Image (cartoon, helix red, strand yellow):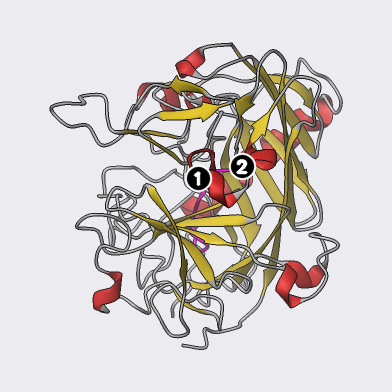
Amino acid sequence: MRHNMYPVAAACLLAAASTALASAEDSSTTTTASPDENGKYWIHGEGISAAFIAYGASITDLVVEDQYGIPRDVVAGFDNASYYAIDRQHPHFGGVPGRYANRIKNSSFEIDGETYHIKANENPTPEHPDGLDTLHGGPDGWDWRNFTVVSYTNSSITFSIVDPDGKEGFPGEVVSYITYTLGKMTWDFKMVAIATTKKTPIMLSSHTYWNLDGFTNNETQSVLNHTFYLPYSGQRVGVDNILIPTGDILANKRGSANDFWSAPKQIGHSFGDPELEGNCGFNCTGYDNCWLVNREPNGPFTDWRNEKNFVARLQSAWSGIQLDIYSDQEAFQMYSCNGQNGSMALKASQGLHDGKFPRTIPKYGCVVMEVEDWIDAINQPQWQRGSKQVFEPGGDPYVLQASYRFSINSTKASF
């Protein structure tokens, strides 16, 4: 029998959700509500519950039932909010990377003829001990900092942060609000950021680690058997061997390793294909790529919320859980957790408790899916993304909107 009740994990999930629900009902609209004993703020929808923390405005738990009615916590994280600041190896678990998500070439960019140098934090060398580039806003980016809870109800929570002028080298102050809302098997979020004093680049995302089996699949802890589909992504951003955009836009030819547009396929389908070697950087096999979202050629694009306009689909045949992602953004990054090495512990609500697998996240044990704009476009002016990535006082705010919709669906990969 493939599916078991896994009573320890299920009990943890139900106890946490019921405790949090009582807390949320007692403080349905207050802005001074307290988190639970683990520092988490729980919110609830129909058939879905989720927990968030002020650190990085991060999602820590997301619970939905699988095809057998068993609750599964399908996102990675820590049991207690305090772990996020203590464990310095955490790979941006569930947070909001900012003020500029993904990578910035040479840790520099130019605005109106002035060059800005920001703090590096990736790919160190003897000549550049801090790194060759900046990842997710620098060594003290937003998902390493505490946000403020400004609104908290039974079904929604809003966080805010004020990012000072000069922090990590970025020009100008930025004020941002992050709102998460649960509905009927849906998790929606809206991210708004306002440049208050100077022109500055802004690009945000949600850096959530997914395993639609809740790490309870008794056949594998990998997500390589999850089905992935990007119906509008026939192109991707070309990168060098440290994943910095080269300026090239590449075709994802039908049947190639990066083709997830022509038909759904399992993430692990192309493993063993030489094309996948180095696909996620030097000496790396897997995915850490930015696909473009080309909806216009398929007809007039009028409403990103329309049921037919999902930009990505992730599905597990084992749990039966399907996630459809809708977004107003025009790029989509997928990372197949190539860097996980079994050192990150699972939460008590996840995994098997019978000793069959280690209670840690293995390599390829999760997948990160980021809705965002074209990565490092601030250093690629020929892409003409300036109005979507550089913001100024008195101008339009930065806005990102997304809807994550869950269902039970036994659809299998086409190949």
Residue beneath the point at 59% across and 25% down: 112
Q: Which residues are magenta?
A: 205-214
Cα distance in 3D space between marks 1 and 2: 50 Å
> What amino acid type should be assigned to the residue bearing mark 2?
Ala
| Kind of element beneath mark 2 | helix
Residue beneath the point at 24% across and 68% down: 277
Mark 2 Cα shell of 10 Å, populated few (<14), some (14-19), many (≥20):
few
Magenta: main secondary structure equals loop
Residue 230 appears left or right of 126: right
Residue 159 appears left or right of 370: right
| Kind of element beneath mark 1 | loop
Q: Is residue 374 visible?
A: no
The percent position of residue 405, horizontal first and vertical second, equals 72, 60
The percent position of residue 146, horizontal first and vertical second, equals 56, 19
Q: How many marks?
A: 2
**Which residue, given by chain and number where applicable, does mark 1 sit on?**
380
Residue with the most extreme front position: 113
Q: Is residue 54 above or below residue 135?
A: above
Q: Nearer the viewer, residue 121 or 300?
A: 300
Label 1 with label 2: CB-CB less than 8 Å: no
**Which residue, given by chain and number where applicable, does mark 2 sit on?**
15
> What amino acid type should be assigned to the residue bearing mark 1?
Gln
Is residue 22 part of the magenta span, yes or no?
no
Q: Nearer the viewer, residue 15 or 175?
A: 175
Q: Is residue 84 above or below residue 335?
A: above
